Image (cartoon, grey):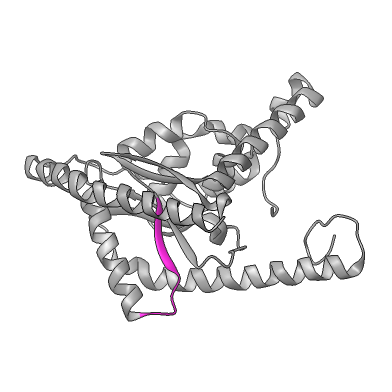
Amino acid sequence: MKSGYVTEKSDGVVVARALADETGNRRAAQANLQWAARFAPRLRPATFKMIAASGSTSYYSASKSRDLDFFCITSEGRLWTALTQGLIHARVFSLAHPRSPEICFSCIMDEAFAANLFREEQGPLFARDALATIVLRGESTYRWLLSEAEWISRIYPNAYAKRLKQGPAIKGRGGPSAVSRVVELFLFLVVGTYVRTKSKMLNQRLERTGQLDRLFAIRCGRNHLIYESRRYSRLKQRYSRSFTARARLLGPSSASRPNQGGGRH
């Protein structure tokens, strides 16, 4: 144990360098959160029901990629209206603040899609990410989603219970009007095409420059937009294998003695 981190046994120079890097990442994450707090009020509560900092920033270990990832929940049937507004605000924000990180809506979905996603077991890394996310606005919506994901309590019971105890859980109400549905379809066709084209071009650039770990897949639909990097996909597989192996070692009783959550990785 060194400064609150678990390190491999090695000489002091290697450990000191690793701790220095992690300290730098923590400072970068704290700076990202300050930028996130300045940007979030620009997004309208009527369409953005929840706004949270996610990715490496939520683990207080931001990389030097200059990305600031957001996990957002929108009103049911209003995802592309909200995302279009968000992309415009992000562009204006970056022009007004050239030193700010690049804002990325890496995981955005409407309330109906989010509820279905959280109800189905998604694996230990998804659970860890859900508990680690830093909510900037919409705590009640966030707790409602967690209440739909009782399976997380079997993996990280203490952290799950702690997040649910922080206040009431409130589900959004009402669906889109007929006019809103027409606008949504139009924006999905136009802005959705733009997003997919831009993503394809970025992947091509990453491949040319040898940044293969940063290559990503995109899940894009009427009610969701999710980016997943190749590195994250591998990490998800490693988490699943580790938890499966642990369950085999502990036997049937492992279901009642799961990982308690917390810690850094």
Determine whether 36 is above or below 121 in the image.
Answer: below
In which image quadrant can residue 157 be found?
top right
Q: Is residue 205 left or right of residue 195?
A: right
Q: Which residue is located at x 25 percent, y 47 percent?
A: 192
Q: Is residue 201 above or below residue 3?
A: above
* Residue beneath the point at 43% across and 52% down: 204
- Residue 250 at what x, y percent from top left? 80, 26
Q: Is residue 81 among the parts visible in the rendering?
A: yes
Query: Residue at image x 56%, y 50%?
Result: 212
Query: Residue 52: x, y in percent?
Result: 43, 57
Name the one closer to the observer, 75 or 107: 107
Q: Say which residue appears at 36% left-offset and 66% top-offset.
A: 40
Left or right, residue 127 beside residue 99: right
Q: Looking at the rendering, which quadrant does residue 255 occupy?
A: top right
Examine the rendering and report whether any part of residue 54 can be seen. Answer: no
Q: Residue 45 at what x, y percent from top left?
A: 27, 58
Q: Which residues are magenta?
A: 97-106
The residue at the far top in this view is: 252
Is 123 a magenta residue? no
Q: Is residue 7 above or below residue 189?
A: below
Outermost residue toward the front in this view: 208
Q: Nearer the viewer, residue 254 or 96?
A: 96
Residue 159 x, y percent position in the rendering: 61, 46
Q: Quadrant of the N terminus?
A: bottom right
In the image, taking residue 242 as reference, residue 147 lies left or right, namely left
Q: Is residue 32 above or below residue 176?
A: below
